[in-house]
Image (cartoon, rainbow, N blue to C red):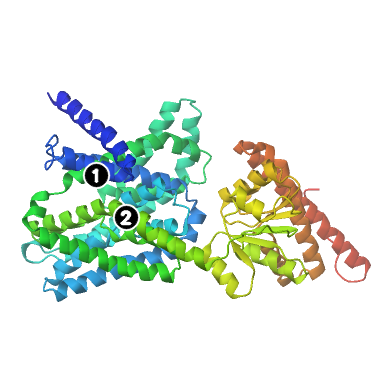
Amino acid sequence: MEHSAWLTGTLIYLAAAVIAVPLAKLLGLGSIIGYLGAGILIGPWGLQLVTDPKEMLRFAEFGVVLMLFLVGLELEPRRLWSLRKPIFGWGNVQLLGSAALMAAVGVAAGADWRLAVVGALGLAMSSTAIGLGVLAERNLLGTSSGQSILSVALLQDVAAIPILALVPLLAFGPHASEGGGWLGAAKAIGVIAAIVLGGRLLLRPAFRWIARSDTPEIFTAASLLLVVATAALMQAVGLSMALGAFLAGVLLAESEYRRELETDIEPFKGLLLGLFFIAVGMSIDFAVVLQRPGLIALLVASFLLLKAALLWAMARAMPLPLPERPVFILLLAQGGEFGFVVFQSAAQAGVIAAPVSSLLVAVVAISMLVTPLLLVAADRWWIPRLAQHKAATLDEISEPQHAPVIIAGFGRYGQIIGRLLFANGITPTVLEHDAEQVEAMRKWGWPVFYGDATRLDLLRTAGADKARVLVLAIDDVEQSVAVARMAREHFPQAIIVARARNVQHYYALRELGVTLIERETLDSALMSARSVLQQLGWEPHLARTLALKFRRHTVEQLDAMAPHRGDEARLIAAAKQGRQQLEERFAQERAQVQRRQVRAGWGTEPEPDADA
């Protein structure tokens, strides 16, 4: 009987998704609205095909966990470290600022301060599932607004530790906390440290050992085991399961198995995430909504407007491009699935009454339901107006350009190239796709055109078919490679001079036949190394010579290692051999310098090399 019920439930969920999602997309509403609508339709307040959505919500939450694991795989630890300021800076501004505003309004309206604080903290959290789901659906994760939303979402997952510890401390009467909250926080921090340290030491060797079995299904099972294990550890100490999965993904972001892991996990993530949205739709308690519809509408509108006002101020201060601000505001103004956990925990601890908890849960669920609808409205009326306003303030390339040099990207790297060219009487055609950057450069007198260099028609207008040199100073790796591929195909006469963000970017450009590539940090790091040698007593000329030789050796070694990119063992062996050769060469250089100094009458004879 139980088996039959499970089969019937599975049939209902899949049929609802297959019917509702294509219909919603056909109407231009997006897949998330389709999932939410399907949940409402089959739930207790629709056709009543499913009467207990809570169990499905717990199961489908694993889709959010898998999504955060995949997001973590795209963020190498160094890149994540570079996001520390927006995560702990703007993330704290959003969370604490929104909570403070809503708590103040709640107290002013006459609510008990404990209720106001818990309600504000729960409502300040945004939906990671909807936020990152929309970004993935619209391919916006790499944009300024996408990175900002990701930063805030990560801070909110981290904030689960102190918020869940705080809720029991606000209890009074028979439910008063006895300090268990802080003990839970200490356990949580310990588990996070264990995941990070264990992951650094064990994950890569474990996956290497599994990969040697050459059994794809076992590798898939190991991928799911990793996600489930980290999620279970986090849940055991009362933390967000998604945060544990995200940490596991980050730890594997630099591994050679990243792409295979993504391929294995992606199908499970998509299906379970859809089930999560269906479960959210089913969990809306329309009895509470119908009982006090005016209060519900007032609460939803009030907290959305308060958060939106703070987010608008943040978007201006960050600053985000005007057309990207609506998505940033709407995706972070909504409530989130973590609010369900906060309000349930507060009700169990006696901080708020059960009816109030149900009311707040309904408010969060409705905000999650209306957010995709607000995004559709913004797409039709708000974002186009902002885009028109931005376009009106920017000059487009309407006449063909004839400069011998085109610079694609005018950030910190492209500006240095441009300044040197301008100083020598060469006026390049400069393209920059960031509208805010274009405006800033024009204020300083730089003739910069607004446009996306990945567009073939724009490159033709910029004169790429006649240009002698195309400078690729674009910050985004994928866009840089796309422009290089396009230029090699359509503008073969243009010599490409490219900036490489890292070694992988360098190799990707080399595979396209680009030979004039400079890694953006190599020369600045060598200048610092020269300074270190000089401070330790090396002559300036010798330090400069050694730095130049090191540079030449590094470039030669990169070229020699290029054929072995996919073979980690050979790459490591080649790197060790190259390092040994460099050390031997420099030892000989030092010995020759010391001998010349002795012949000149100062210095001491070098000691013989013990390894010679």
Q: In the figure, is residue 606 to the left or right of 247?
A: right
* Mark 1 neighbour class, 10 Å CA radius: few under 14, some 14 to 19, many 20 or more: many
Picture disc at residue 377: 2
Tag 1: amino acid: Leu
Residue 504, percent across and down?
61, 46
Picture disc at residue 424: none
Give the residue at x 58% y 75%: 443
From this viewpoint, which residue is outermost toward the front?
399
In this view, the residue in front, 187 or 284, is 284
Closer to the N terminus: mark 1 or mark 2?
A: 1
Residue 527, percent across and down?
70, 66
Whether residue 284 is situated above or below residue 396 in the rendered picture: above
In this view, the residue in front, 414 or 571, is 414
Q: Is residue 152 visible?
A: no
Q: In the figure, is residue 458 to the left or right of 22?
A: right
In this view, the residue in front, 18 or 125, is 18
In this view, the residue in front, 480 or 57, is 480
Residue 563, percent across and down?
68, 37
Q: CA distance from mark 1 to mark 2?
A: 17 Å
Whether residue 116 is situated above or below residue 148 in the rendered picture: below
Residue 131, percent across and down?
34, 52
User: Which structural element holds mark 1?
Assistant: helix
User: Which structural element holds mark 2?
Assistant: helix
Tag 2: amino acid: Ala
Which quadrant of the figure has residue 385? bottom left
* Mark 2 neighbour class, 10 Å CA radius: few under 14, some 14 to 19, many 20 or more: few
Q: Is residue 421 visible?
A: yes
Whether residue 41 is situated above or below residue 370 in the rendered picture: above
Q: Which residue is mark 1?
A: 36
* Circle 1 or circle 2, nearest the eye: 2
